[in-house]
Each structure stands twice: as C-alpha cells, then as structure tokens.
Image (cartoon, helix red, strand yellow):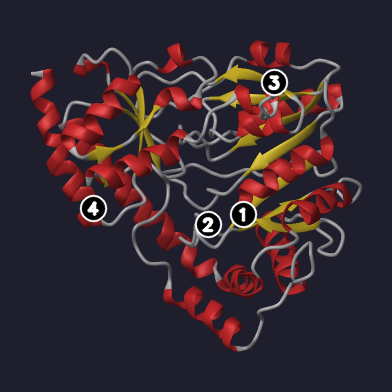
Amino acid sequence: MTTRPRTSLKTQHFTESVIREMTRLAMQHGAVNLSQGFPDFAAPEWIKEAACDAIRGDVNQYAVTWGAKPLRDAIAADLQARHGLTIDPDRQVTVCCGATEAMIATLMAIVDPGDEVVVFEPFYENYGPDAILSGATPRFVRLRPPAVSDAGGDWSFDPNELAAAFCNRTRAIIINTPNNPTGKVFTRDELAAIARLCHHWGAIAITDEIYEHILFEDATHVPMATLDGMADRTVTINSTSKTFSVTGWRIGWAVAPADIAPAVRKVHDFLTVGAAAPLQAAAAQALRTGAPYYPDLRSQYQARRDRLIALLERAGFRCFLPRGAYYVMTDVSPFGFPDDVAFVRHLVTEIGVAAVPGSSFFRDSAAARQLVRFCFCKKDETLAEAGRRLARMAELVR
C-alpha cells in the first residue's frame, strides 16, 4: 500500500486569493476589472526613465540583501522630512519584494507558535494567512461601517472589544491606514488607544501605510511610529506600488526598531535574497523628488473616487465614502441577491464588471453577505465603460 503525500495543515486554513481569482474571471469574460487594485494607466514617465537609466547604467546585479544604500537613505530621509522620524538607514531599513513580503518577513521574524496577532476586519486578505503561516493565531476585531447616509462618517471599532482581544499571548497588531478595503483613515485618538494596549501588553504595532499619499477631504495620515513611545515598538511597512503606480515592480520596505530589524533582515534574506536592483535605484529617485507629485496624485484620485461613486449610486448601489486608499465598499442588498459571491459572479458574467465579494475580507463570511468592493485606480475611459455596463443593474432595484 502506497501512502500519498500531503500538504501542510496550515495551508488548509485559508484559500487562494479571491482578489486575484476575480482578475482571472474578468479576463475570461472580457469584463471591466474593478476588482484588483492595480492602475490601468501609465506610471509617471520620470520614474520609468529612472529605471531605464539604472538598467543602461548596468545596475543589474544583486543589491545588498537588505536594500541598496541609496534607497535605504532615501527612505530614512523621507520619513525625517515628512514625519520628523529619525531612522538609521544602515540598521533599521529592510527593502523587500513589495509590502507583501515585508509583512510576512516581519511576522515570521517576531512571532512564535502560540503567539497571537490582532487583526482588524474587514482586512486586506493577506493578513489572516500571513498570521497563520508565521505560526500565530489571528484575533479579529470588527470595524463597523457608518450609516450609508452619513457622508462624514468612518468605519470604527469598539475600544472595549479591542482591549478584550489583547492578552499575554498577544505579540503584535496589524494596522492598515489608509485601509484596504474600507478606505478608513485611523485617527490620532484611535492610534493612541492602540498604542496604550501595545505598551500594556508588550506588543508590536505593524503598520501597513502603502496608501498614505492617497487621502481625501481633510483626512490626515498619522504614522503610528510618531506617537509617544511607539518608535521603539512599531514596524512601518510601505512601498512604491500604489503611490507611483508601479505595482509590478515589487519594491517595498519595513522600517523597524534597531533591535527588531536584524531578525526581519534574516527572514527576508532567506525568503527572497533581495529586490530588483535597477528598480530600487528608480524608487530612490522617486522618494527624493516626489514631493511636488503627491498633491496632484491626491486630487486625481479624489476625482476618480467621486466619479465611480456617482456611477455606482446611479446604478442602485449604496456606497460607503472612503477617506483614503482607492477602493469603495458598497452595500448591494437592494439588488436582492442571496449573498456577495452570487452577486459578483452575476456581475462579472452577465454585466461585464469584476468586483470583489466582501466576504473575502472577513473571517466570518456571514458578516459581509451584502458587501462588495470596487477599486477606482482606473482611467476615465475604464470607469465610463464600467458605468455604462453597471447602468443595467438599476433595473433590478426599480
């Protein structure tokens, strides 16, 4: 009798990416892809030229494992200039293959089996599997939406529920601000409440800040590391992907306290060795010269947000107004579908628009049976075509 090989038990606790599955379905059905968060417009010419210059200049071999020095210097200088943080680029910065690798490298560096990691839900779909792969048990705390009619409201958590999620096994908490998928921007008071719990329980804050430049109205990004006493217990993750519309470059980084960074660097080294050297050179130039670019980025994305929300509302969707990032969560209950998965499958096959079922962002799918996420990092022509197709949905709510 032959014993069949098996896969690891930990992989049985999560599925493949629903977001990337929706992109495949969009391609299969010729749908407008408003599911996966990558721009369909060109990256700025100047950053592409910087990458080409680096390649032509023969920056084509391995960079230092934890990142080329010009990029580490640029990351530290940027944090000093914009947020007043003093960072040692030689001891605290680890350049990774995107923020995704920075997150898993950080968790694997700080978490042991039996530890717990607090995660807000709805969450970016990688966070739960990342905790499991690193051997931790995720503890979820619910972000609750404002009333759809409350244009100034934001998703919020119950401080008592958050406090109850911490215990002597809590090793870390993951905070994504601005948030994917909700567009929530955590306030200074909310971050201070989280910081107090981190201090009390000796936990590390891991902050995913890749949308920090995509903010709307009066929203302000507050880095957790700038709060009193948090620079020594925060790992800040960021990347070039969303800010500079180069999601395929996979250049991200983790900025950690000097006593934590060596562990992150060791894990990163054996995961991927290093990120693409010429693209690191281009990323360094982007950070050094990006300041005049950020206000225009913000205004362009606010215009795209407003355009997509108008199209969705005209088609019968109820929209939660995002204050940052480039996603819109919607309530699809007016359309009468049994759940979010049935809705998005109808949308992609019959209407020709791809979105993401809200349940992919929740531990309990029942909590999101009528929630669907759209992204608006798309050309005006793309949004217009999506609106033309979505208009057919209005017939279902008349």
Work out how far the residue at label 4 is from the one at label 1, CA to CA, in angstroms. Answer: 26 Å
Q: Quadrant of residue 55?
A: bottom right
Who comes first in sequence, dot 4 or dot 3? 3
Residue at the (75%, 33%) spot, across then down: 134
Who comes first in sequence, dot 4 or dot 1? 1
Q: The N terminus appears in which quarter of the rendering?
A: top right
The answer, for residue 265, to whether it is visible in the render is: yes
Who comes first in sequence, dot 2 or dot 4? 2
Which mark is nearer the camera, 3 or 2? 3
Q: Which residue is mark 2?
A: 241
Judge from the rendering whether residue 58 lies leftward or rightward of residue 136; answer left or right: left
Who comes first in sequence, dot 3 or dot 2? 3
Q: Which residue is mark 4?
A: 382
Marks 1,2: beta carbons within 8 A: yes
Q: What label does residue 98 carry, if any?
A: 1
The amino acid type, in three-letter code, at marker 4 is Thr
The amino acid type, in three-letter code, at marker 3 is Met
Q: Which residue is mark 3?
A: 1
Q: Could you say whether the residue bearing mark 1 is in a helix, strand or loop?
A: helix
Work out how far the residue at label 4 is from the one at label 3, CA to CA, in angstroms. Answer: 57 Å
Q: Could you say whether the residue bearing mark 3 is in a helix, strand or loop?
A: loop
Residue at the farthest front position: 1
Work out how far the residue at label 3 is from the one at label 2, CA to CA, in angstroms. Answer: 51 Å
- Image coordinates for residue 328, horizontal then vertical, percent: 36, 35
Who comes first in sequence, dot 1 or dot 2? 1
- Image coordinates for residue 166, horizontal then vertical, percent: 76, 17
Marks 2,4: beta carbons within 8 A: no
